[in-house]
Image (cartoon, rainbow, N blue to C red):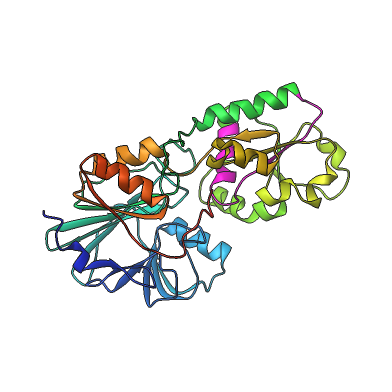
Amino acid sequence: MPAAGIDQWLYPTERGLYCEPAGVYIDPARPVDRAIITHGHSDHARPGHGAVLATAETIEIMKTRIGPDAAGRFEAAPLGTVLTLGGVSVRLVPAGHILGSAQIVLEWKGQRAVVSGDYKRASDPTCAPFEPIACDVFVTEATFALPVFHHEPAIREVSRLLASMHRNPDRAHLVGAYGLGKCQRVIRLARDAGYDAPIYLHGAMIALTELYQTLGVHLGDLRPVPDGKPSELAGALILCPPSAVSDRWSRRFPDPVTSFASGWMRIKGRVRQSGVELPLIISDHADWPELIDTVVETGAEDIWVTHGRDDALVYELGRRGLKARALALVGFEDEGE
Protein backbone atom coordinates (compact mmCIF):
# COMPACT_ATOMS: atom_id res chain seq x y z
CA MET A 1 0.00 0.00 0.00
CA PRO A 2 2.11 2.93 -1.21
CA ALA A 3 1.77 6.16 0.76
CA ALA A 4 2.14 8.28 -2.37
CA GLY A 5 -1.12 9.99 -3.16
CA ILE A 6 -2.77 10.05 0.25
CA ASP A 7 -2.20 13.79 0.37
CA GLN A 8 -4.49 14.03 -2.67
CA TRP A 9 -7.48 12.96 -0.59
CA LEU A 10 -6.40 13.86 2.96
CA TYR A 11 -4.91 17.30 3.40
CA PRO A 12 -4.85 20.40 5.63
CA THR A 13 -7.12 23.38 4.97
CA GLU A 14 -7.76 26.61 6.84
CA ARG A 15 -10.62 24.83 8.62
CA GLY A 16 -8.65 21.72 9.53
CA LEU A 17 -7.56 18.35 8.21
CA TYR A 18 -9.97 17.37 5.42
CA CYS A 19 -10.79 13.96 3.97
CA GLU A 20 -12.17 14.92 0.58
CA PRO A 21 -13.93 11.75 -0.61
CA ALA A 22 -15.68 11.40 2.76
CA GLY A 23 -16.53 15.11 2.88
CA VAL A 24 -15.45 15.30 6.51
CA TYR A 25 -13.02 17.34 8.60
CA ILE A 26 -11.13 15.96 11.58
CA ASP A 27 -11.08 18.24 14.65
CA PRO A 28 -11.80 21.34 12.55
CA ALA A 29 -10.89 24.74 13.93
CA ARG A 30 -13.97 26.39 12.40
CA PRO A 31 -17.58 25.28 12.00
CA VAL A 32 -18.07 22.78 9.16
CA ASP A 33 -20.93 20.71 7.79
CA ARG A 34 -19.48 17.40 8.99
CA ALA A 35 -16.72 16.72 11.53
CA ILE A 36 -15.08 13.78 13.23
CA ILE A 37 -13.89 14.72 16.72
CA THR A 38 -11.02 12.80 18.33
CA HIS A 39 -11.73 13.89 21.92
CA GLY A 40 -13.43 16.46 24.10
CA HIS A 41 -10.69 19.03 24.82
CA SER A 42 -11.65 22.47 23.54
CA ASP A 43 -8.78 22.79 21.06
CA HIS A 44 -10.19 19.74 19.25
CA ALA A 45 -13.92 19.81 20.04
CA ARG A 46 -15.48 23.11 19.01
CA PRO A 47 -19.13 24.14 18.67
CA GLY A 48 -21.08 24.97 15.55
CA HIS A 49 -20.62 21.92 13.31
CA GLY A 50 -23.59 20.63 11.37
CA ALA A 51 -22.89 17.01 12.29
CA VAL A 52 -20.34 15.42 14.62
CA LEU A 53 -19.12 11.83 14.58
CA ALA A 54 -17.31 10.78 17.78
CA THR A 55 -17.35 8.20 20.54
CA ALA A 56 -20.37 8.28 22.82
CA GLU A 57 -18.16 9.50 25.69
CA THR A 58 -16.78 12.39 23.63
CA ILE A 59 -20.28 13.39 22.65
CA GLU A 60 -21.39 13.49 26.27
CA ILE A 61 -18.29 15.50 27.18
CA MET A 62 -19.05 18.01 24.42
CA LYS A 63 -22.64 18.35 25.60
CA THR A 64 -21.48 18.91 29.18
CA ARG A 65 -18.77 21.43 28.29
CA ILE A 66 -20.41 23.29 25.41
CA GLY A 67 -24.10 22.50 25.71
CA PRO A 68 -26.63 20.06 24.26
CA ASP A 69 -26.75 22.08 21.04
CA ALA A 70 -22.97 22.00 20.52
CA ALA A 71 -23.62 20.48 17.09
CA GLY A 72 -26.62 20.24 14.81
CA ARG A 73 -26.50 16.45 15.03
CA PHE A 74 -24.39 13.90 16.91
CA GLU A 75 -23.57 10.39 15.71
CA ALA A 76 -21.95 8.03 18.20
CA ALA A 77 -19.38 5.60 16.78
CA PRO A 78 -18.40 2.66 19.00
CA LEU A 79 -14.67 1.98 19.07
CA GLY A 80 -13.70 -0.48 16.35
CA THR A 81 -16.92 -0.21 14.36
CA VAL A 82 -16.33 0.31 10.62
CA LEU A 83 -18.38 3.03 8.96
CA THR A 84 -18.41 4.10 5.30
CA LEU A 85 -18.45 7.77 4.33
CA GLY A 86 -18.32 8.50 0.60
CA GLY A 87 -16.58 5.22 -0.04
CA VAL A 88 -14.01 5.83 2.72
CA SER A 89 -13.81 3.22 5.46
CA VAL A 90 -13.73 4.99 8.83
CA ARG A 91 -13.23 3.53 12.28
CA LEU A 92 -12.30 4.93 15.66
CA VAL A 93 -9.72 3.17 17.84
CA PRO A 94 -8.52 4.08 21.34
CA ALA A 95 -5.99 6.89 21.75
CA GLY A 96 -5.40 6.54 25.50
CA HIS A 97 -5.51 10.33 26.02
CA ILE A 98 -8.70 10.85 28.05
CA LEU A 99 -12.08 9.15 28.37
CA GLY A 100 -13.57 8.70 24.91
CA SER A 101 -10.45 9.76 23.02
CA ALA A 102 -9.92 8.06 19.67
CA GLN A 103 -7.62 7.84 16.72
CA ILE A 104 -9.30 8.10 13.32
CA VAL A 105 -8.47 5.31 10.86
CA LEU A 106 -9.25 6.21 7.22
CA GLU A 107 -8.97 3.72 4.35
CA TRP A 108 -9.57 4.52 0.70
CA LYS A 109 -8.47 2.78 -2.48
CA GLY A 110 -6.08 0.47 -0.67
CA GLN A 111 -4.40 3.20 1.39
CA ARG A 112 -4.65 3.76 5.12
CA ALA A 113 -4.08 6.92 7.14
CA VAL A 114 -4.33 7.17 10.92
CA VAL A 115 -4.95 10.52 12.61
CA SER A 116 -3.87 10.16 16.23
CA GLY A 117 -5.41 13.22 17.83
CA ASP A 118 -3.75 13.55 21.23
CA TYR A 119 -2.52 10.30 22.75
CA LYS A 120 -0.43 8.72 25.46
CA ARG A 121 1.08 5.27 25.87
CA ALA A 122 1.13 5.13 29.69
CA SER A 123 -1.64 3.21 31.42
CA ASP A 124 -4.64 5.20 32.62
CA PRO A 125 -7.45 3.59 34.61
CA THR A 126 -9.94 6.19 33.35
CA CYS A 127 -9.77 5.43 29.63
CA ALA A 128 -9.08 2.70 27.07
CA PRO A 129 -5.37 2.22 26.24
CA PHE A 130 -3.79 3.38 22.99
CA GLU A 131 -4.06 0.86 20.18
CA PRO A 132 -1.26 1.00 17.57
CA ILE A 133 -2.51 0.61 13.98
CA ALA A 134 -0.31 -0.24 10.99
CA CYS A 135 -0.72 2.43 8.33
CA ASP A 136 0.81 4.22 5.35
CA VAL A 137 0.49 7.72 6.81
CA PHE A 138 0.49 8.44 10.53
CA VAL A 139 -0.61 11.90 11.66
CA THR A 140 0.92 12.36 15.10
CA GLU A 141 0.74 15.04 17.74
CA ALA A 142 3.99 16.53 19.07
CA THR A 143 3.07 18.27 22.34
CA PHE A 144 6.12 16.95 24.21
CA ALA A 145 8.38 16.35 21.23
CA LEU A 146 11.69 17.36 22.78
CA PRO A 147 14.33 14.97 24.16
CA VAL A 148 14.05 16.51 27.64
CA PHE A 149 10.56 15.09 28.08
CA HIS A 150 10.58 11.70 29.77
CA HIS A 151 7.41 11.44 31.86
CA GLU A 152 7.50 9.70 35.22
CA PRO A 153 5.09 6.82 35.94
CA ALA A 154 1.93 8.55 37.09
CA ILE A 155 1.35 6.17 40.00
CA ARG A 156 4.81 7.07 41.32
CA GLU A 157 3.96 10.76 41.23
CA VAL A 158 0.65 10.16 43.02
CA SER A 159 2.54 8.13 45.61
CA ARG A 160 4.73 11.20 46.17
CA LEU A 161 1.57 13.23 46.69
CA LEU A 162 0.19 10.78 49.24
CA ALA A 163 3.56 10.60 51.01
CA SER A 164 3.53 14.39 51.34
CA MET A 165 0.04 14.21 52.84
CA HIS A 166 1.29 11.67 55.35
CA ARG A 167 4.22 13.92 56.31
CA ASN A 168 2.01 17.01 56.54
CA PRO A 169 -1.25 15.81 58.11
CA ASP A 170 -2.30 19.33 59.14
CA ARG A 171 -1.91 20.92 55.70
CA ALA A 172 -4.45 20.74 52.90
CA HIS A 173 -2.96 19.65 49.57
CA LEU A 174 -4.21 21.73 46.62
CA VAL A 175 -3.55 19.97 43.32
CA GLY A 176 -3.95 22.04 40.18
CA ALA A 177 -5.12 19.74 37.39
CA TYR A 178 -7.03 20.31 34.19
CA GLY A 179 -10.69 19.56 34.68
CA LEU A 180 -11.10 17.08 31.83
CA GLY A 181 -8.97 13.96 32.02
CA LYS A 182 -6.19 14.96 34.39
CA CYS A 183 -8.43 15.64 37.39
CA GLN A 184 -10.24 12.32 37.10
CA ARG A 185 -7.01 10.40 36.44
CA VAL A 186 -5.35 11.79 39.57
CA ILE A 187 -8.41 10.91 41.65
CA ARG A 188 -8.56 7.35 40.34
CA LEU A 189 -4.81 6.83 40.78
CA ALA A 190 -5.09 8.02 44.38
CA ARG A 191 -7.92 5.54 44.95
CA ASP A 192 -5.90 2.74 43.37
CA ALA A 193 -3.02 3.63 45.70
CA GLY A 194 -5.30 3.09 48.71
CA TYR A 195 -6.52 6.62 49.47
CA ASP A 196 -10.19 6.23 50.43
CA ALA A 197 -10.90 9.48 52.30
CA PRO A 198 -13.20 12.09 50.74
CA ILE A 199 -11.60 14.12 47.95
CA TYR A 200 -12.76 17.72 47.59
CA LEU A 201 -13.37 19.51 44.30
CA HIS A 202 -13.36 23.12 43.22
CA GLY A 203 -16.73 23.97 41.71
CA ALA A 204 -15.29 24.09 38.19
CA MET A 205 -14.28 20.42 38.45
CA ILE A 206 -17.61 18.97 39.51
CA ALA A 207 -19.68 18.60 36.32
CA LEU A 208 -17.10 16.66 34.31
CA THR A 209 -16.11 14.53 37.28
CA GLU A 210 -19.74 13.59 37.84
CA LEU A 211 -19.99 12.78 34.13
CA TYR A 212 -17.01 10.43 34.39
CA GLN A 213 -18.78 8.60 37.20
CA THR A 214 -22.00 8.45 35.19
CA LEU A 215 -20.00 6.92 32.34
CA GLY A 216 -18.66 4.19 34.61
CA VAL A 217 -15.39 5.54 35.98
CA HIS A 218 -15.53 4.92 39.75
CA LEU A 219 -13.91 7.74 41.72
CA GLY A 220 -15.13 7.20 45.27
CA ASP A 221 -16.34 9.80 47.76
CA LEU A 222 -16.14 13.24 46.12
CA ARG A 223 -17.40 16.44 47.70
CA PRO A 224 -17.47 20.12 46.74
CA VAL A 225 -15.20 22.41 48.71
CA PRO A 226 -17.50 23.87 51.38
CA ASP A 227 -18.00 27.61 51.54
CA GLY A 228 -17.37 27.91 55.27
CA LYS A 229 -14.62 26.94 57.70
CA PRO A 230 -11.85 25.92 55.31
CA SER A 231 -9.76 25.05 58.36
CA GLU A 232 -11.86 21.89 58.54
CA LEU A 233 -10.08 20.74 55.37
CA ALA A 234 -6.66 20.59 57.04
CA GLY A 235 -5.02 17.44 55.74
CA ALA A 236 -7.54 17.02 52.89
CA LEU A 237 -6.85 16.40 49.21
CA ILE A 238 -8.39 19.13 47.05
CA LEU A 239 -8.38 19.34 43.26
CA CYS A 240 -8.82 22.64 41.48
CA PRO A 241 -8.06 24.32 38.15
CA PRO A 242 -4.37 25.26 37.81
CA SER A 243 -5.23 28.95 37.92
CA ALA A 244 -6.97 28.55 41.28
CA VAL A 245 -3.80 27.35 43.02
CA SER A 246 -2.39 30.87 43.14
CA ASP A 247 -5.50 33.06 43.08
CA ARG A 248 -7.72 34.45 45.83
CA TRP A 249 -9.70 31.19 46.10
CA SER A 250 -6.69 29.31 47.48
CA ARG A 251 -6.04 31.87 50.22
CA ARG A 252 -8.92 30.48 52.26
CA PHE A 253 -6.77 27.46 53.19
CA PRO A 254 -4.23 27.90 56.00
CA ASP A 255 -0.70 26.98 54.86
CA PRO A 256 -1.65 24.58 52.04
CA VAL A 257 0.80 22.45 50.10
CA THR A 258 0.37 23.63 46.52
CA SER A 259 0.86 21.27 43.62
CA PHE A 260 0.43 21.10 39.84
CA ALA A 261 0.02 17.86 37.88
CA SER A 262 1.43 18.34 34.39
CA GLY A 263 4.06 17.07 32.01
CA TRP A 264 5.43 20.60 31.97
CA MET A 265 6.61 20.08 35.53
CA ARG A 266 9.63 18.34 34.02
CA ILE A 267 10.95 21.82 33.18
CA LYS A 268 12.47 23.63 36.17
CA GLY A 269 11.59 27.01 34.72
CA ARG A 270 7.94 26.00 34.51
CA VAL A 271 8.05 24.82 38.12
CA ARG A 272 9.48 28.16 39.25
CA GLN A 273 6.92 30.01 37.16
CA SER A 274 4.05 28.05 38.68
CA GLY A 275 5.31 28.70 42.21
CA VAL A 276 4.06 25.35 43.50
CA GLU A 277 5.64 23.43 46.35
CA LEU A 278 5.01 19.94 45.00
CA PRO A 279 5.34 19.57 41.21
CA LEU A 280 3.90 16.32 39.87
CA ILE A 281 5.06 15.12 36.45
CA ILE A 282 1.78 13.60 35.26
CA SER A 283 1.00 13.95 31.57
CA ASP A 284 -1.83 12.79 29.33
CA HIS A 285 0.41 12.99 26.26
CA ALA A 286 3.16 10.75 24.91
CA ASP A 287 6.69 11.76 25.86
CA TRP A 288 9.68 11.95 23.51
CA PRO A 289 10.63 8.24 23.39
CA GLU A 290 6.97 7.20 23.24
CA LEU A 291 6.35 9.46 20.24
CA ILE A 292 9.26 7.93 18.36
CA ASP A 293 8.43 4.36 19.38
CA THR A 294 4.81 4.85 18.30
CA VAL A 295 5.79 6.15 14.88
CA VAL A 296 8.07 3.15 14.35
CA GLU A 297 5.38 0.76 15.57
CA THR A 298 2.86 1.97 12.98
CA GLY A 299 5.28 1.17 10.15
CA ALA A 300 4.12 4.33 8.37
CA GLU A 301 6.03 5.41 5.28
CA ASP A 302 5.05 9.04 5.83
CA ILE A 303 4.65 10.81 9.17
CA TRP A 304 2.75 14.08 9.40
CA VAL A 305 3.44 16.01 12.60
CA THR A 306 0.89 18.41 14.06
CA HIS A 307 0.34 20.92 16.90
CA GLY A 308 3.42 20.87 19.04
CA ARG A 309 7.21 20.82 18.77
CA ASP A 310 7.03 19.55 15.21
CA ASP A 311 10.50 20.73 14.12
CA ALA A 312 12.36 18.56 16.64
CA LEU A 313 10.33 15.46 15.87
CA VAL A 314 10.55 15.92 12.11
CA TYR A 315 14.33 16.30 12.40
CA GLU A 316 14.74 13.22 14.59
CA LEU A 317 12.56 11.03 12.39
CA GLY A 318 14.47 12.20 9.31
CA ARG A 319 17.73 11.38 11.05
CA ARG A 320 16.40 7.87 11.51
CA GLY A 321 15.64 7.55 7.81
CA LEU A 322 11.90 8.14 8.05
CA LYS A 323 9.95 10.55 5.85
CA ALA A 324 8.35 13.19 8.05
CA ARG A 325 6.94 16.67 7.61
CA ALA A 326 5.19 19.30 9.66
CA LEU A 327 1.50 19.63 8.92
CA ALA A 328 0.40 23.23 9.24
CA LEU A 329 -2.77 23.09 11.31
CA VAL A 330 -3.93 26.13 13.25
CA GLY A 331 -5.81 26.35 16.52
CA PHE A 332 -4.26 23.53 18.54
CA GLU A 333 -2.88 24.25 21.99
CA ASP A 334 -2.16 22.34 25.21
CA GLU A 335 -5.64 22.70 26.68
CA GLY A 336 -5.63 19.24 28.18
CA GLU A 337 -2.25 19.37 29.89
The residue at the point 57 percent across, 63 percent down is 65
Q: Which residue lies furthest to the top in this view?
A: 167
The residue at the point 21 percent across, 68 percent down is 9
Give the camera-side residue of 136 and 77: 136
Check the image and report above or below for 180 versus 238. Answer: below
Q: Is 182 positioned to the left or the right of 3 in the image? A: right
The residue at the point 72 percent across, 23 percent down is 166
The residue at the point 38 percent across, 41 percent down is 129
Q: What stretch is highlighted in magenta?
A: 168-190
Which percent across, then down, holds residue 23? 28, 74
- Total number of numbered discs in the rendering: 0
Which percent across, then down, holds residue 165? 71, 27
Check the image and report above or below for 187 versus 113. Answer: above
Check the image and report above or below for 116 versus 45. Answer: above
Q: Can residue 335 be seen in this view?
A: yes
Q: Is residue 220 visible?
A: no
Give the camera-side residue of 110 and 126: 110
Q: Is 70 positioned to the left or the right of 113 in the image? A: right
Q: Is 280 positioned to the left or the right of 315 in the image? A: right
Which percent across, then down, holds residue 330? 43, 65
Q: Quadrant of residue 86?
A: bottom left
Give the camera-side residue of 230 and 42: 42
Q: In which quarter of the image is residue 182?
A: top right
Which percent across, then down, holds residue 218? 56, 41
Magenta stretch containing residue 283, yes or no? no
Q: Is 109 positioned to the left or the right of 131 in the image? A: left
Magenta stretch containing residue 169, yes or no? yes
